[in-house]
Structure formats: C-alpha cells, structure tokens
Amino acid sequence: MAHISIIVAIAENYAIGKDNRLLWHISEDLKRFKKLTTGHTVIMGKKTYESLPVRPLPNRTSIVITDIPGEKIEGCVMAYSIEDAVNKCNPAEENFVIGGGSVYRQFLPIIDKLYLTKVHHAFDADTFFPEIHFDEWDLLEKQDVKADEKNKYNYTYLIFKRKSCNKYN
C-alpha cells in the first residue's frame, strides 16, 4: 500500500485557513513544503486546489478529490472519494495530503506520518485541522524557529510517525 503523510501548518487553536486562504505567510515554511513535496504526489480537495497560486503545483502529481462525478481538471488526477484517492497514490513513494480541513479529517486516521508546522499564535478562522491525539504518535524531529524581520510569529517544525500500524501501511 502507498505511504501517505499529511503536511500542514496549524495555529495554536488548530486554525488552518479563512475564506479559502492561508492565515499567515511564512516564507521558510513554504520553502520547506516545496522541498518535501516536489517529485511526489500531493492529494487535496478541490477548494484547496482552487486556492493555489500556481495550478497544478509544478513537479508534483496532483490528485484532486471532488464529489462531482466525472469532473476533470487539466493536469490533475481526479479522485471521487478518499478510497479512490488512496488507490491512485504512488505505492513506491511518500504521498502528501495538503488540505483542506475536510480532507485532513478523513485522512488523519489512515496516515502514518505527520509533518506539522505549529505557528505559536491563535487566529480567527473558518477552517480547522482536526484534533491530534499526540499519544498515538512518536515525535521524530522538532525544530523551534523564532520570529524575525521576515516573520512575526514563532513556530515549530514537528515530524511525527504513528505508533501503531494501520490498514493502509
């Protein structure tokens, strides 16, 4: 089975977006996202796809999940359910779920790795990441980053691996 990971930046209150937009701009986090996902498959809902500044993301296979039967987006692999998206993942590589909230919620129970950027601030939002039960995860890496002239928020990079196996791995 394919190895599926989530990559996400969340606020202290689990906020991830508002009005189909990101809540902050952290250049280094965007560079990290690009470095980790380039050359891999990225999985997202249609609203997340529509929010991207460049569509589809260059040098990545984009799986877009939609509930409209037969819908097509040029340059993308279409999936019509979470199971369909899982079946279209590349079993020889790590595949990354990149949003949005509903897609994260449905994938969280079946992924085996979580790349989390935790922004140390609470934001007003309309889209949230589901609650993470940290007792189900082993912390592999942690890197704290202080606010500076380019970014006004402290944040932390965290990488977790699920403690127990699941049906997709």
Image (tube, helix red, strand yellow):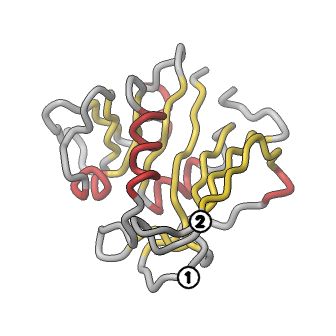
**Badge number at residue 122:** 1
Judged left or right of residue 154, residue 64 is left
Label 1 – label 2 distance at C-alpha: 16 Å
Is residue 31 left or right of 55 when viewed as pictured? right
Q: Nearer the viewer, mark 1 or mark 2?
A: 2
Q: Residue furthest left?
A: 74
Mark 2 surroundings: few (<14), some (14-19) or many (≥20) residues within 10 A: few
Secondary-structure class at tag 1: loop
Residue 13, relative to residue 163: is it above or below?
Answer: below
Q: Quadrant of residue 77?
A: top left
Q: In the displayed image of the protein, which residue is found farthest to the top? A: 92
Residue 49 spot, x, y in % from top left: 27, 50
Asked if 120 appears above or below 37 in the picture, the reply is below
Image quadrant in which you'd find residue 75: top left
Identify which residue is drawn at 46% across, 52% down: 29
N-terminal of the two: label 1 or label 2?
Answer: 1
- Specify the amino acid type for callout 2: Lys
| Image location of residue 169, percent across then percent down | 69, 26
Q: Position of residue 74 (x, y in %)?
A: 13, 34
The kind of residue tagged 1 is: Ala
Q: Which residue is mark 2?
A: 146
Q: Quadrant of the N terminus?
A: top right
Query: In which image quadrant can residue 50 be found?
Result: bottom left
Between residues 32 and 10, which one lies in front from this camera angle? 32
Say if 139 sits above or below 148 in the image. above
Give the left or right position of residue 68, taking residue 130 as reference.
Answer: left
Q: Secondary structure at mark 2?
A: loop
Q: What is the count of numbered marks?
A: 2
